[in-house]
Amino acid sequence: MESDSLYFSYLISLKSCFISLSYLKKLILYIVIFDFSVSSPSLSIFSLSVSKNNNIGAKRMIRKINDSQFLGCLKYLKTGEIGGRVYPLILGAAFGVSHNAYAEDSYNIDYFGNLDIGVHSHQLSGQDSKFEVDGGMLSTSYAGVRANAPLSESLTLNAEIASFFRLDDGDITRGLDGEGTFSRAAWAGIKGGFGSIRLGRISTLNFINTIRFNPFGASPKFSPSFMHNYVGSPAQPMSTGMGGSDSGWDNTINYTAPKLAGAVLSLSYAPDEGSNRGERMGGSITVGGYPFAAVLSVEKITDASITYPMALTTLATAFPVFTAQQYSTRQLGTSYDFKTFKLFGQLSRSKVEGMRAGGAQNYEIKMAQFGISVPAGPGVAKASFANSTMDRSWGANLKRDTLTVGYDYTLSDNAIWYTRYMHDKVSDLSVGNSYAMGVNYSF
């Protein structure tokens, strides 16, 4: 038998039949691995496919062959002569022909992400204006990996991990203290005819509702409904309806049922596991898709202990601090695509109960958002207006109005150049005006 080094030199000289380029849509590369660590030589052949949408698939085609097939393989790599039954199997696979003799393990890996960076003059109501190089104006930057592996004809294993990061300073976070590395997503689950079950850190159903039914999506800096629901200004004496919930829950158990009569039901539960976040429950019903879609989502948090000042600490309204114990939220989101323009609408109602100054206190926030997007030239023009009212048990009611307009110029299938203007006003505070320009790339 020839030396091991010679065998590996054969591996480097793979013939062209081991590489198939089909209409430039998918590259299939066959990888041959020889194993000399056992008494009987063995060979593993993997097919590695890379498609235009960056999906990577790998399939173990043959795990072990007999000595005759092994030597025949080496002969073919050297001379091009077929020396064993293994080769018709390999070439058959290249043309999509299956064979019962295969021992197949397959999976798909998809990497994805979003890069966002630009400049803006940022000023919320009651704040001073400041000029910054910043990200997260169209969407927070992130990167992640998804994987799925068929377990049977009807059952698939799925997993996803994703991390937020900031292009302006290189930090692996949205800017929150104590944030985990994979705070955007970190879960695994199974999917089949019964629906899907996932476990881990998963986006909340209310958050998905919020970003889906407003024209500025998941923009924490310029989406009015995102800001009113999740990212209030610390300089304003208004809280947000869902800020204590965060966009994702740790330790979540999520079940999504298969579509029934055009509707999809999804349920989430997250135990507190000894933290101050409380026990969390959520549900949503989704109907339609195109051109009409609507989602009703609900969320409830009990036995929490989340303490925060009610405004910037330099304001008199900030103290005494408020300790939230119970949250409940209902939100309806809807959209209709008329092709020449698309309309968005959201209504939400959140109630937070807790303790302040030694006594039971509560506040309720009602939010309404209306938006529109219109294809215009090489891009899309957008506008969104949100109004929130806050009813407080310890003080006068408050109101916040936010209007954002913008234009997304399409540079390529994945890249957008965008401009933004936002007007923000809270009761008894000065008007805030913000301007932004940036570039966003998704993959």
Image: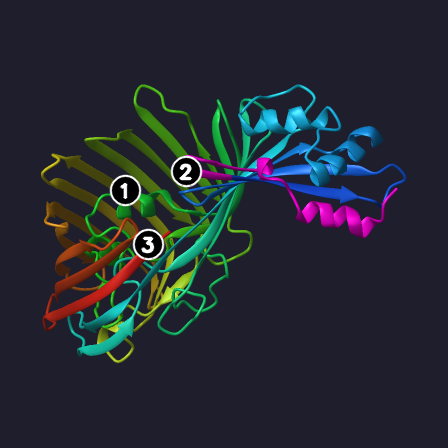
Marks 3/1: CA–CA distance: 15 Å
Residue at the image position 52 percent from the left and 45 percent from the top = 187
Please state which amino acid type lies under the numbered disc 2: Lys
Snapshot quadrant of residue 26: top left
Going from the N terminus, do you reach mark 2 or mark 3 first? Answer: 2
Secondary-structure class at tag 1? strand
Per the rendered image, the range of residues in magenta is 1-27
Query: Which-is-in-front pick, marks 3 and 1?
Result: 1
Q: Which residue is mark 1?
A: 330
Q: Residues within 10 Å of mark 3 (few under 14, many from 20)?
A: some
Query: Magenta stretch: residue 15 in it?
Result: yes
Q: Residue 268: x and y, percent?
A: 44, 39
* Rendering colour mode: rainbow
Snapshot quadrant of residue 430: bottom left
- Of the pair 325 and 115, the residue shown nearer to us: 115
Residue at the image position 37 percent from the left and 37 percent from the top = 283
Q: Which residue is mark 2?
A: 25
Q: Residue 432: x and y, percent?
A: 13, 70
